[in-house]
Image (cartoon, helix red, strand yellow):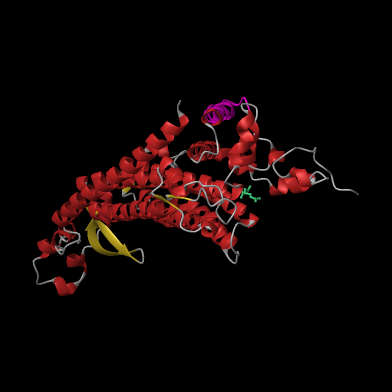
């Protein structure tokens, strides 16, 4: 039986083919489901590239103007649903160029001195950098929420655990500050990954650069990248930034899962140390006594998918020769799904953190009273060893003593503020550049 053929569509490479592609292969090889989320990125890259072509004298001023107006119209059409991406055109790059053809006869010239290989790398970097900043921002906000609660409960004694066995008394503030430190490191990691993602690959063309006299650094500046690529082979094939972004996400997700587990455990009736904010819990249809900690459980459970996204990308990259290989398309879905998925989790963790309410009497009841339980303590000042007074004696820097916790919380709050302002500065610079390209 002959394979089903799709209708013949003229795309940039159909000229040398006499047969239309196999229909099942088209669906198999399409990246349109993912690419639908890269329309804005793709148009931004094309706007910057068009300006570079104009500066190189490849586009006339009129052609540049028509292409710019056309690209903005294509974006508006796609966003408003007046135009749709077509599967026969494989990806967002060919779709945007084809749609541009309706607005200007110069559309075909836009592909001069570039390739879909540097385009796709560009789109993914634009996507990654935006979401890494969103992740850093969300982690700072989570840290702020945890630190506010930590300051409030710096004196509230609770059992500290090792092996999940009551070990030594600590305070709730001490524990919440521990989670805040993790969030701050995750924010820092997101910013580190941002620095390496924020490099423009445009101008690398298919793999070797181009013989047209364009300046990749000018394109990079237009898109508010820190710099342009150093090697064209590397530029089109490097997906380190995706692996790195997803590794930041995986670590962050693992942190959230530990936090989710503690909230689940400590809010359960068996412990009863905490009450979770009601809007982030659910009830049971047949067991009215229950209040289920679903948001906390999902934080615990979602780490699996975040770790999977990292492994999926690394598995795709492993063993690839230089330079662009179609395999790289498989790194798209984990990145495009994984980053927003992680940011969403951090935002929910923040809502949980700011809504938890401790139940001091339950914490007090669970504290191990050494002075009463062990005969060796018979001759000492029993009052000094009352469990809720023990943390105050842990006065080493970083220890459980309330004054130490208050100091550490203040230092962490300063760090969160500095990080958040770094994130804002990057975001503002990028937004200004993108706005300049997108607005008439
Ligand atoms: N759809 C491809 C991807 O997502 C775009 C690049 C294709 N390049 C090529 N020469 N076939 O990776």
Give the residues in magenta: 65-83
Residue 164, quarter of picture:
bottom left
Residue 243 is left or right of residue 267, and the answer is right
**In the rendered structure, does residue 37 fall within the stretch colored magenta?**
no
Q: Is residue 84 visible?
A: no
* Residue 107 pos. (x, y %): 62, 33
* Residue 132 pos. (x, y %): 41, 47
Name the residue at the right extreme.
1
Q: Is residue 182 visible?
A: yes
Residue 356, quarter of picture:
top left
Q: Is residue 432 above or below residue 201?
A: above
Q: Nearer the viewer, residue 322 or 6?
A: 322
The dominant secondary structure in magenta is: helix
Residue beneath the point at 29% across and 52% down:
180
Residue 432 is left or right of residue 34, and the answer is left
Q: Is residue 47 above or below residue 140?
A: above
Q: Nearer the viewer, residue 270 or 238?
A: 238
**In the rendered structure, does residue 67 fall within the stretch colored magenta?**
yes
* Residue 51 pos. (x, y %): 49, 37
Residue 394 is left or right of residue 125, and the answer is left
Residue beneath the point at 39% across and 40% down:
430
Name the residue at the front extreme.
57
Q: Nearer the viewer, residue 409 or 84?
A: 84
Q: Nearer the viewer, residue 327 or 351?
A: 327
Badge count: 0
* Residue 287 pos. (x, y %): 50, 41
Residue beneath the point at 20% across and 66% down:
370
């Amino acid at each position: 039986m002959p394979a089903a053929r799709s209708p013949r569509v003229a795309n940039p490479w159909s000229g040398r083919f006499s047969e239309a592609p196999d229909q099942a292969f088209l669906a198999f090889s399409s990246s349109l489901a993912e690419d639908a989320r890269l329309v804005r990125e793709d148009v931004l890259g094309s706007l910057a590239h068009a300006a570079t072509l104009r500066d190189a004298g490849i586009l006339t001023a009129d052609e540049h103007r028509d292409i710019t107006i056309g690209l903005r119209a294509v974006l508006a059409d796609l966003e408003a649903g007046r135009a749709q991406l077509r599967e026969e055109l494989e990806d967002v790059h060919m779709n945007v160029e084809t749609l541009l053809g309706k607005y200007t006869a110069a559309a075909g010239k836009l592909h001069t001195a570039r390739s879909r290989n540097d385009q796709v790398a560009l789109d993914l970097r634009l996507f990654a950098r935006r979401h890494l900043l969103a992740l850093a921002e969300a982690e700072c906000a989570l840290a702020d929420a945890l630190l506010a609660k930590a300051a409030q409960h710096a004196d509230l004694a609770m059992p500290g655990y090792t092996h999940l066995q009551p070990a030594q008394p600590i305070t709730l503030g001490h524990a919440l500050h521990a989670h805040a430190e993790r969030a701050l490191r995750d924010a820092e990691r997101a910013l580190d990954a941002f620095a390496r993602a924020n490099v423009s690959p445009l101008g690398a063309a298919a793999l070797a650069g181009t013989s047209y006299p364009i300046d990749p650094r000018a394109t990079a500046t237009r898109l508010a990248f820190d710099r342009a690529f150093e090697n064209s082979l590397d530029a089109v094939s490097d997906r380190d930034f995706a692996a790195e972004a997803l590794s930041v996400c995986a670590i962050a997700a693992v942190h959230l899962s530990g936090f989710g587990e503690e909230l689940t455990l400590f809010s359960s009736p068996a412990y009863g140390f905490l009450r979770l904010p009601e809007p982030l819990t659910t009830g049971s249809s047949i067991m009215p006594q229950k209040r289920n900690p679903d948001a906390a459980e999902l934080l615990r459970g979602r780490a699996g998918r975040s770790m999977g996204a990292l492994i999926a990308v690394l598995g795709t990259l492993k063993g690839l020769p230089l330079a662009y290989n179609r395999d790289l398309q498989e790194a798209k879905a984990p990145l495009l799904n994984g980053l927003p998925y992680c940011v969403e989790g951090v935002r929910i963790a923040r809502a949980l953190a700011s809504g938890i309410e401790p139940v001091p009497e339950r914490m007090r009841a669970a504290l191990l009273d050494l002075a009463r339980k062990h005969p060796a303590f018979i001759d000492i000042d029993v009052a000094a060893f009352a469990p809720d007074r023990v943390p105050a004696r842990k006065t080493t820097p970083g220890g459980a003593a309330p004054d130490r916790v208050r100091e550490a919380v203040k230092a962490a709050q300063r760090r969160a503020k500095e990080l958040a302002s770094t994130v804002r500065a990057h975001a503002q610079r990028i937004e200004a550049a993108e706005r300049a390209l997108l607005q008439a």
